[in-house]
């Protein structure tokens, strides 16, 4: 017998106005936004309700059915020649996502040391990217879920020839004792590229977001193909990572009470620079 699911909270409607600004108003230094595009999406409890509806809609039997098909002899023989390529893509994914982290960290370091030098991205974008990778694949996925979900990987469950009991994605009572299946860390890292995508230039933003979703899904499917994860491990890696990107983007860019301007971030870095200089200046000099 199914039970009702109740989501308690304020249902919000997030509205983004996206356009281009090439001039300022004559009476104040305020950008004039033209070619405005209005985008609406559920927020607050409404967003939680949408995610819950997706979670309930997913058939619990699909995980085992998809994993069993991927591990069937015919499919394994078909995919066997691709296994070396899968390993190369896996290594390349780590390097590719690391590039964004390094560039973002380098941007903040450059802004801290030489604030007037041009960088590949803005300080706000760098902050968004670093926070996304730290909170999504870092803290939530690898620090919390994979360490404590206890969900066995497909190859380890009894139904697919292993020794451990299969559990659904919401059941944290499995027999895995570390680096578990839920959720996919590599897919989360790939989906974290949504962070640079959402701050891409407006004409390219939708394309960048679509490319990030396709890329994350492709990495996830590849991990499923080699028996590393169930389908819901990939789905919720994307859902959780996208939710964190949405929250961080709202805090840094959209929401009035928390949003930061580029000047705010650079002012914070300037204060940090002054404190570092003061600390270095007060350090005792060595006697000769």
Image: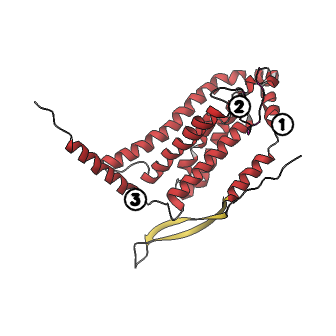
Q: Which residues are magenta?
A: 162-175
Our reading of the magenta stretch's main secondary structure is loop
Q: Position of residue 125 (x, y in %)?
A: 47, 51
Q: Nearer the viewer, mark 2 or mark 3?
A: 2
Q: Position of residue 39 (x, y in %)?
A: 63, 63
Dot 3: few (<14), some (14–19), or many (≥20) neighbours within 10 Å? few
Magenta stretch encompasses residue 202: no
Name the residue: 44% across, 70% down. 23
Name the residue: 54% across, 32% down. 94
Disc ID at residue 151: 2
Any part of residue 137 in sight: yes
Distance (Cα) linking label 3 and label 1: 50 Å
Q: For mark 1, what is the residue?
A: 61
Name the residue: 56% across, 69% down. 35
Circle 1 SS class: helix
Disc ID at residue 264: 3
Any part of residue 211 in sight: no
Pick whichever, 261 or 94, lies toward us. 261
């Amino acid at each position: 017998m199914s039970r009702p699911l109740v989501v308690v909270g304020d249902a919000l409607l997030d509205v983004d106005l996206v356009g281009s600004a090439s001039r300022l108003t004559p009476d104040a230094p305020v950008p004039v936004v033209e070619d405005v595009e209005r985008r609406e999406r559920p927020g607050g409890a409404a967003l939680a309700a949408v995610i819950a509806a997706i979670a309930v809609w997913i058939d619990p039997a699909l995980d085992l059915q998809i994993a069993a098909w991927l591990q069937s002899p015919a499919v394994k023989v078909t995919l066997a020649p691709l296994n070396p390529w899968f390993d190369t893509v896996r290594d390349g994914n780590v390097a590719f996502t690391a590039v964004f982290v390094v560039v973002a960290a380098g941007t903040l370091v450059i802004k801290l040391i030489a604030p007037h030098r041009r960088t590949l991205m803005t300080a706000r974008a760098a902050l968004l990217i670093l926070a996304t990778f730290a909170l999504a694949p870092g803290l939530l996925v690898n620090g919390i879920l994979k360490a404590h979900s206890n969900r066995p990987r497909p190859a380890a469950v009894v139904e697919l020839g292993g020794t451990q009991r299969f559990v659904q994605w919401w059941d944290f009572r499995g027999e895995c004792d570390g680096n578990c299946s839920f959720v996919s860390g590599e897919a989360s890292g790939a989906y974290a590229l949504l962070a640079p995508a959402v701050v891409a230039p407006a004409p390219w933003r939708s394309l960048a977001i679509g490319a990030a979703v396709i890329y994350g899904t492709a990495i996830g499917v590849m991990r499923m193909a080699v028996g590393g994860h169930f389908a819901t491990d990939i789905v919720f890696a994307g859902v959780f990572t996208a939710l964190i990107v949405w929250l961080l983007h709202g805090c840094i860019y959209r929401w009035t009470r928390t949003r930061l301007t580029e000047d705010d971030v650079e002012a914070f870095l300037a204060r940090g620079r002054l404190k570092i200089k003061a600390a270095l200046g007060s350090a005792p000099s060595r006697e000769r």
